[in-house]
Amino acid sequence: MVRDKEIVTLPRTLEEFRVWEANDGFKYEWNDGELIKFTGMNKLQVKIYDILLDLFIDKGYKKRGTFVSEYDVQLTGIQMRRPDVAYLTKEQIEAANKGTDVIPEFVIEIISGNDNINKVEEKIGEYYKAGIKVVWLIFPENKSVHVYTSRRDVKICIENDICSAAPVLPEFEIGVDVLLG
């Protein structure tokens, strides 16, 4: 790629991707040799993240782990994804600090108008193959949350329905109306 007479070298391998720094204002995921470009969280997504983080802290889960925004999750030897939010236990944080790739048990994707739903569905499959146990897809525009506890088990929450992160975080529950107004 050429940018203002500067040649930008794109990564060709996962190892190159891990150390590559994009300077174009976008964020990237790696999927078997394919660079997947996306923007970071927008203002609405940050607000939703903040509401969820407050709930996480209020429920006392901060003692057991943390919520991380756009964390690099190495799903397989050829896939690195960045869910909008990932829950990591204290043990996973320590293992990651020692260089181990860890798989969160609970992730959240906040869907924007730029997301391709077929690609999101593909990502859900990848998450479950890697061992993630709960996935939330939050649709702010439609005021709904899809809570997946497997590829086959999904609860679509609207209005005052309660979304739960059980069995990973059993008391992490919030109404769609509280989360999305």
Image (cartoon, rainbow, N blue to C red):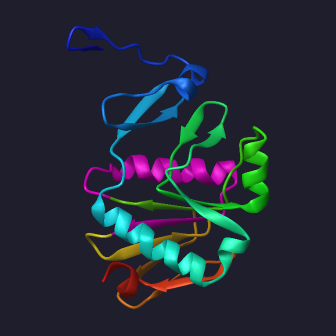
Residue 39 appears in the figure: yes
Task: Establish if 93 lies above or below 159.
Answer: above
- Residue 180 is drawn in which quadrant? bottom left
Residue 62, x across and y down, in percent: 66, 72
User: What is the magenta range?
Assistant: 112-139
Residue 138, x across and y down, in percent: 40, 68
Q: Which residue is rendered at x = 57% and y = 43% of the image?
A: 72
Q: Quadrant of the N terminus?
A: top left
Q: Which residue is rendered at x = 55% and y = 49% of the image?
A: 71
Q: Which residue is rendered at x = 63% and y = 40% of the image?
A: 74
Residue 164 appears in the figure: no
Task: Establish if 119 lies above or below 90.
Answer: above
Residue 148, x across and y down, in percent: 55, 68
- Residue 80 is drawn in which quadrant? top right
Q: Which residue is rendered at x = 48% and y = 47% of the image?
A: 122
- Furthest-left residue in view? 4
17 displayed left or right of 37: right
- The front one of 147 and 152 is 147
- Furthest-bottom residue in view? 160
Is residue 48 inside the magenta stretch? no
Task: Establish if 98 lies above or below 22.
Answer: below
- The front one of 53 and 139 is 53
Is residue 116 inside the magenta stretch? yes
Labels in figure, total: 0
44 displayed left or right of 134: left
Residue 143, x across and y down, in percent: 31, 76
Q: Quadrant of the C terminus?
A: bottom left
